[in-house]
Amino acid sequence: MQPQLLAVGELAAGQTLTVPVYRFIGSDPAAPSVYIQANVHGAEVQGNAVILQLLRYLRQYPPKGNVTLVPLANPLGINQKSGEFTLGRFDPITGENWNRQYLDNQLPLSHWLSEHQGYSDRELVAAYRQALIANLQTRLQSPWGVTTGQRLAYTLQLLATEADIALDLHTGPKSCRHLYCPEYQRHAAMQFSIPFTLFIPNLFGGAMDEAIFCPWWRLSDYLASCGRQFEIPVVAFTLELGEQELIDMAQAQQDAQGILAFLSVRGVIAEPLLPLEMPRYGTHLKNYRKFHAPQAGLVQYLVAPGSLVEQGDPLVRLLRLDLPESEQEQLLTAPEAGAAILHFASAAVQQGTELYKIMTQLTEIS
Ligand SMILES: [Zn+2]
């Protein structure tokens, strides 16, 4: 299958930047449509391998709904290198995170709904989606222009806004697999083959998943305040698939199977596939705590990502060769029980470096 190339920007010497777009046309117009992108952060390459596996599976299991796959979604990010490492998390010109530049796609709901009175839910969904798309196109064509990062983000967001299900594939630095899931879709945590889930509120912080579900969540909340029940018809998730700077095709096959099982549960593919059995844990985003280095030094990370820790368990061995012998090696311990989800990638850290991110107040999901 040949991808289409979508223009997302231009380099200084005039070369066009493009991303590959693979489209499967579904057999059932009533089935949900899907958008999956990977590698918006330059070093987070594993999602591309997952998309490669999905391309193979989807030829085997032709989808009922339309499926759009966009690997290599940030051609600037993946080429932002320093020595042998890929940076690609922040636009080097503005310093902004590449995944915080999506449009907060807000419509004036009271006014908009007054112009769409008498619409059925289905008609409302179609009209609202068109209005969101039109809003994005207007922003892209602003006479004042948009930034490099906004052009990329809004162009991807246009594709994602067409879909009922959007998945943004990322990785952590050194990380286990975990899921960002909107609170209104708590049950989805059981439908992915991912052991840890963060439940996120209806707040827009600039990320792709929020950019897709927030407008629909707001519409549903607004209608509820007017006494009308309206089920949120669109979902979006961020999947964190292991660590950066790593391609693992065997793991990518498992990741792709997990996504396929989710799509099967959601009626996108006909074959009955089940998510893996595993213990699953979750917590609210506000309980996702960062453990910062109390002082600088050289660091041995003692807890593998994905491990449960108790309060007081050693997390990090910190070396300080500039200090007296009694202070040259110390242990830093977990301030609270939880699951160590990811840790910093480097062994040399400044004071204040985010060493670990820990999900606290864990509950088992079943
Ligand atoms: Zn990322």
Image (cartoon, rainbow, N blue to C red):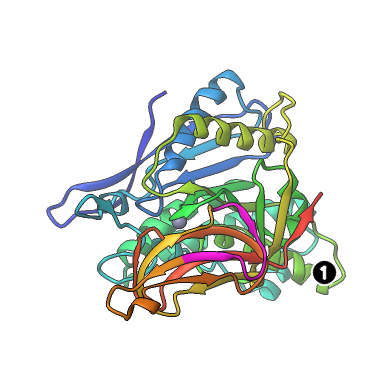
Region rendered in magenta: 305-316
Which image quadrant is residue 183 in?
bottom right
Front in this rendered view, residue 256 or 269: 256
**Place of residue 103 in the rendered image (x, y in percent of width and height, measured from the top left):** 49, 66
Q: Which residue occupies 29% across, 72% down?
A: 94
Determine the residue located farthest toward the front in the rendered image: 325
Q: Residue at x 26, y 66 (%)?
A: 92
Q: Is mark 1 within 8 Å of ligand 1?
A: no
Q: Amino acid at mark 1?
A: Ala
Is residue 200 in view? no
Judge the density around disc 1: few (<14), some (14-19), many (≥20) Cα neighbours within 10 Å. Answer: few
Give left or right: position of 127 versus 265: left
Q: Image height check: is 12 above or below 226?
A: above
Q: In the figure, residue 358 lies in which quadrant?
A: bottom right
Residue 251 versus residue 30: which sits nearer the camera? Answer: 251
Q: Quadrant of the N terminus?
A: top left
**Figure quadrant, ligand 1:** bottom left
Residue 208 on image: x %, y %: 52, 58
Residue 27 x %, y %: 64, 25
Front-most of residues 240 and 28? 240
Compared to 227, does 99 lie above or below? Answer: above
Q: Which residue is under mark 1?
A: 224
Q: Is residue 94 left or right of residue 35?
A: left
Q: Quadrant of residue 269?
A: top right
Which residue does the image show at 39% across and 64% down from the upper left? Answer: 299
Which SS class for mark 1? helix
